[in-house]
Amino acid sequence: MPNLLKIDVEGAEQLVLAGGERCLTDFKPAMIVETGDGNLIQRIQGIGYVAFHIDSWNVLFVPISQGIDLAPIDRLFSRL
């Protein structure tokens, strides 16, 4: 399983998440998702991720459960 996923599927993010949710909850890779969908962001946060705004459309999701020090990320990006 990769440590980082980039999801850019032109509006089909909910479908990707539906198909891969078990994999995400089991393996917890970090993700960069191109989305402006607030419901999608909340859904991913609900399975154990912290969301950071990278730019206009990209959101970085970091798993909470892996003991990652989020302080460096907090200095670079704002949390959603």
Image: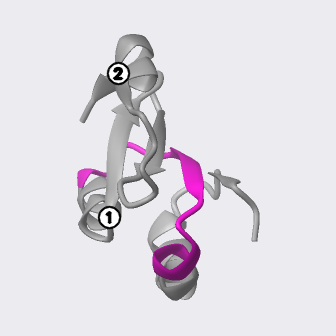
Going by the numbered disc 2, the residue's amino acid type is Asp
Q: Residue at x 37, y 33 (%)?
A: 52
Q: Which mark is residue 74?
A: 2
Counting from the top left corner in percent of width and height, residue 45 is at 28, 58
Residue 4 lies left or right of residue 15; in this view the side is right
Above or below, 37 against 14 in this view is above
Residue 14 picture quarter:
bottom left
Per the image, label 1 sits on a secondary structure element best described as: loop
Residue designated by label 1: 48
Q: How is this picture coloured?
A: one colour
Counting from the top left corner in percent of width and height, residue 49 is at 35, 56
Per the image, label 2 sits on a secondary structure element best described as: helix
Counting from the top left corner in percent of width and height, residue 57 is at 47, 33
Going by the numbered disc 1, the residue's amino acid type is Gly
The residue furthest top is: 75
Above or below, 59 against 53 in this view is below
Q: Residues within 10 Å of mark 2 (few under 14, many from 20)?
A: few
Quadrant of the drawing holding the C terminus: top left
**31 in magenta:** yes
Quadrant of the drawing holding the N terminus: bottom right
Above or below, 19 against 40 in this view is below
Nearer to the camera, 16 or 28:
28
**7 in magenta:** no
Residue 53 picture quarter:
top left
Residue 27 lies left or right of residue 66; in this view the side is right
Q: Which residues are magenta?
A: 24-38
Q: Which mark is residue 73?
A: none
The disc, 2 or 1, on the residue closer to the chain's N-terminal end is: 1
